């Protein structure tokens, strides 16, 4: 068996994450044998549609699939590479599960989620059907805790399940913009710690976007009763989304009306949710099989010129479509309901990777009008050929079962309800040795960290990696030097180097050189020729403003994309791939192997105390709990954030008075070190001790203790929309530089296509 032309890094990633292993964790197959395993297993679907004695047919397609993958022209999603032909045999990457408004339904979904995560899939949910916090539960006469509390339960369940040591569960949580708890949902991830296993998005409607534009109020509706329970200024809700996305990257927007306008099977129901990275809208219980064509492999030399190798691309696309359709039949689904829903529509998602590689080889800058035009041409070509292939398969095998009554009926008898998706390709693009999805290169040179020393497996080997095409061009044109490469690996910009020609500076732009508008327009160009949606990071520089975020959201809406997520450099409590500088462990991590290896060069950042100015504003609030009266005085920073509290109790010298002095002092210190008021409230409200009872505050009619009352009032006053404070941006605290390292190899993580991705070992975490 001939050896495949894989990079050293690709082989390391395959060995760690994809190859079958024995009980001691040692690989029992080579990469070539892995691809043979997958090709053979998937080709067995051919026997379902050909006479049983015609084994030559399956053997023929096995060879076609093997050649397709080993040429690195196409790779399926990771679960297919990991599980095909093995005990799990669960080959789909993305699922959507319903969340019904009952305890029984919620925990049934959590159980199904656990099963999916154990087999390597990611899950998406709409929590919009859940009754709001504080609503009545008729069966128990209790009070509903609301969707936000249940999202946290889903997150905790995910945290407890590692997916066979290869993938950790990833989730998408979506809430409709009209839900009464929408404000609490929008700000859920601002603290950088809540929901580590979730991406979140707000499902916004055309009606809402129009209300924002004209400055109208927008109704909030109880999903249990259908009644309007409140009105909010639409611009207030939009600004809240913008502010939260500016701070931490979440929530994204899902343009739900646009998604349902393209829903191929509206007779089966409305789409309410997507998979974890937002590119695959699905009905309840549907799953989808994804795969990506490596566009960097489709360049044809013609004399001194290069062009897209259209003829070769046209030959490959039908094989890819057949492969993905076969996966549906050989897949072992996590539950019978998922099998039924998936086979009813037979959705597949053929996408691309290596887009920036293709542009570089053609000499086209990523952020140019020529690149946008080519994006439409390439994806339009792939869409047309995928449609033709699905029509041909339907003639051979029959249409998808839900075809009658679909938008395709009666004129387009497709085998698959959807054919194309632009999905994240973080790990499979490392295997293919290409740029990820339709993303621009993040950098031209950087360092990877590997455990390569056989004598000392804990020792890190630091390897410099340089984009091979950049090296080729730089050497050919005479501006290559080791000093230049080291400069780039240390985080320097190509545009700062006088020896580099202007045309090269223009061609070799990277992610942070490209304007937000350039990112959005590229996403939109691919979206116009994609059945499902497009996974794309809208990169923003660290100094981007909230207005920049709002502008990206509006451009995405007007350009016709189905969803958008922004990422501002320095948010999400992490530093995006910072080249040679060591990334620091996050607040929940122990010092990783990189820190241990580099010793004193890497230190956990010291906490920073932001003291109040000598002259500051304050507010005083009088309260009563039971028979006990008192006063809360809150000192404010110039921007309205709380920075200290004083609690005065009527009974001087009492135990309660002394206790309240201690609580006030500790709370003040915590606030000055950046702990959000709502986080303190989450920990301290519901504290129970005397005195307790009714209060004089109609918004907090009963308190279980004075501490309970104080922190409920602080939460209400300083973390709800309309209060005097904005949430503190953790990434902007003076003196604090927080980062994230890969939990498996210690290398730097990058944020790409909605996921945290390690380009060293292939670890990825979406959410």
Image: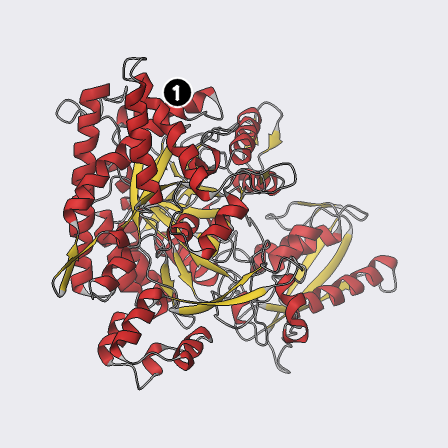
Question: Is residue 559 left or right of 719 when viewed as pictured?
Answer: left
Residue 28's spot in the image, x, y percent? 55, 38
> Which residue appears farthest toward the bottom when viewing the image?
498
- Residue positioned 64% across, 73% down in the render: 608
* Numbered disc total: 1
Q: Position of residue 117 (x, y in %)?
A: 53, 36
Residue 552 versus residue 455: which sits nearer the camera? Answer: 455
**For residue 165, side relative to residue 53 (left or right):** right
Whether residue 51 is situated above or below residue 45 in the rendered picture: above
Residue 357, x across and y down, in percent = 29, 59
Question: Which residue occupies 33% across, 27% down?
Answer: 326
- Out of 591 and 280, give the one closest to the viewer: 591
User: Which residue is at the front of the view, 489 or 560?
Assistant: 489
Q: Is residue 377 above or below residue 143?
A: below
In the picture shown, does residue 656 fall above or below 169?
A: below
**For mark 1, what is the residue?**
340
* Quadrant the N terminus occupies: top left
Within 10 angstroms of label 1, few (less than 14), some, or many (20 or more) residues?
some
Residue 273 appears in the rendering:
yes
Tell me what residue is drawn at x 21 percent, y 30 percent.
390
Where on the picture, by quarter, is residue 411?
A: top left
Task: Inspect this view and state whether residue 346 appears.
Answer: no
Q: Residue at x 57, y 51 (%)?
A: 194
Helix, strand or loop under label 1 = helix
Q: Which colour scheme is used?
A: secondary structure
Percent of width and height locating residue 352: 29, 48
Left or right: 142 as drawn, with respect to 176: right
């Amino acid at each position: 068996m001939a050896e495949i032309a894989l990079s050293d890094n690709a082989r390391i990633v395959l060995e760690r994450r994809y190859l079958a292993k024995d009980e001691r964790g040692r690989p029992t197959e080579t990469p070539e044998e892995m691809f043979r395993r997958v090709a053979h297993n998937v080709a067995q679907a051919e026997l379902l549609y050909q006479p049983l004695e015609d084994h030559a047919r399956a053997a023929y397609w096995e060879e076609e699939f093997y050649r397709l993958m080993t040429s690195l022209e196409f790779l399926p999603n990771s679960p297919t590479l990991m599980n095909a032909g093995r005990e799990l045999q669960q080959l789909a990457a993305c699922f959507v599960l319903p969340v019904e408004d009952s305890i029984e339904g919620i925990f049934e979904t959590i159980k199904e989620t656990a099963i999916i995560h154990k087999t390597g899939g990611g899950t998406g949910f709409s929590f919009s059907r859940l009754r709001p916090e504080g609503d009545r539960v008729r069966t128990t006469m209790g009070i509903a805790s609301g969707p936000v509390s249940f999202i946290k339960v889903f997150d905790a369940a995910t945290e407890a399940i590692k997916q066979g040591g290869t993938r950790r569960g990833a989730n998408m949580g979506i809430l409709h913009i009209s839900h009464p708890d929408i404000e609490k949902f929008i700000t859920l991830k601002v603290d950088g710690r809540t929901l580590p296993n979730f991406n979140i998005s707000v499902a916004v409607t055309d009606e809402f976007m129009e209300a924002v534009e004209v400055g109208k109020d927008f109704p909030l509706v109880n999903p249990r009763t259908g009644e309007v329970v409140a009105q909010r200024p639409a611009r207030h809700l939009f600004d809240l989304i913008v502010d939260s996305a500016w701070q931490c990257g979440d929530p994204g927007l899902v343009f739900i009306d646009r998604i349902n306008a393209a829903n191929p099977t509206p007779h089966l129901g409305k789409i309410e949710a997507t998979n974890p990275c937002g590119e695959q809208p699905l009905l309840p219980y549907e799953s989808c099989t994804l795969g990506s064509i490596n566009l960097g492999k489709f360049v044809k030399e013609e004399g001194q010129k290069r062009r897209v190798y259209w003829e070769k691309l046209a030959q490959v696309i039908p094989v890819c479509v057949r492969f993905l359709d076969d996966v549906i039949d050989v897949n072992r689904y996590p539950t019978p309901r998922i099998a039924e829903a998936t086979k009813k529509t037979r959705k597949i998602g053929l996408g691309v990777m290596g887009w920036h590689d293709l542009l570089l080889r053609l000499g086209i800058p990523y952020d140019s009008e020529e690149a946008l035009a080519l994006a439409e041409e390439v994806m339009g070509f792939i869409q047309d050929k995928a449609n033709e292939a699905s029509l041909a398969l339907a003639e051979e095998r029959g249409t998808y079962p839900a075809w009658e009554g679909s938008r395709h009926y009666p004129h387009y008898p497709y085998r698959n309800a959807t054919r194309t998706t632009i999905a994240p390709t973080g790990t499979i693009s490392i295997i293919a040795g290409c740029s990820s999805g339709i993303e621009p290169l993040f950098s031209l040179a950087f360092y990877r960290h590997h455990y390569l020393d056989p004598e000392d497996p804990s020792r890190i080997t630091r390897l410099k990696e340089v984009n091979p095409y950049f090296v080729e061009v730089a050497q050919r044109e005479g501006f290559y030097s080791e000093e230049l490469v080291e400069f780039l690996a240390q985080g320097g910009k190509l545009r700062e180097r006088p020896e580099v020609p202007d045309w090269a500076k223009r061609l070799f732009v990277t992610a942070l050189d490209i304007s937000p508008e350039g990112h959005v327009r590229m996403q939109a160009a691919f979206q116009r020729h994609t059945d499902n949606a497009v996974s794309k990071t809208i990169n923003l520089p660290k100094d981007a403003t909230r207005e920049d975020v709002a502008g990206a959201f509006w451009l995405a809406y007007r350009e016709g994309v189905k969803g958008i997520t922004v990422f501002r450099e320095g948010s999400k409590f992490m530093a995006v791939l910072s080249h040679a500088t060591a990334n620091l462990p996050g607040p929940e991590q122990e010092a990783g192997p990189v820190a241990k290896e580099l010793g004193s060069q890497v230190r956990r950042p010291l906490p920073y105390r932001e003291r109040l100015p000598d002259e500051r504003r304050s507010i005083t609030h009088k309260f009563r709990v039971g028979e006990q009266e008192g006063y809360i005085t809150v000192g404010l920073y110039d921007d309205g954030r709380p920075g200290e509290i004083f609690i005065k109790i009527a009974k001087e010298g009492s135990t309660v008075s002394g206790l309240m002095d201690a609580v006030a002092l500790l709370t003040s210190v915590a606030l000055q070190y950046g702990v959000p008021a709502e986080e303190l409230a989450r920990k301290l409200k519901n504290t129970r001790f005397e005195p307790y009872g009714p209060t004089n505050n109609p918004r907090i009619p009963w308190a279980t203790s004075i501490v309970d009352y104080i922190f409920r009032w602080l939460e209400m006053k300083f973390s709800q929309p309309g209060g005097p404070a904005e949430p503190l941006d953790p990434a902007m605290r003076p003196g604090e530089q927080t980062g994230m390292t890969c939990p498996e190899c210690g290398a730097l993580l990058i944020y790409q296509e909605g996921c945290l991705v390690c380009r060293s070992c292939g670890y990825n975490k979406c959410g």
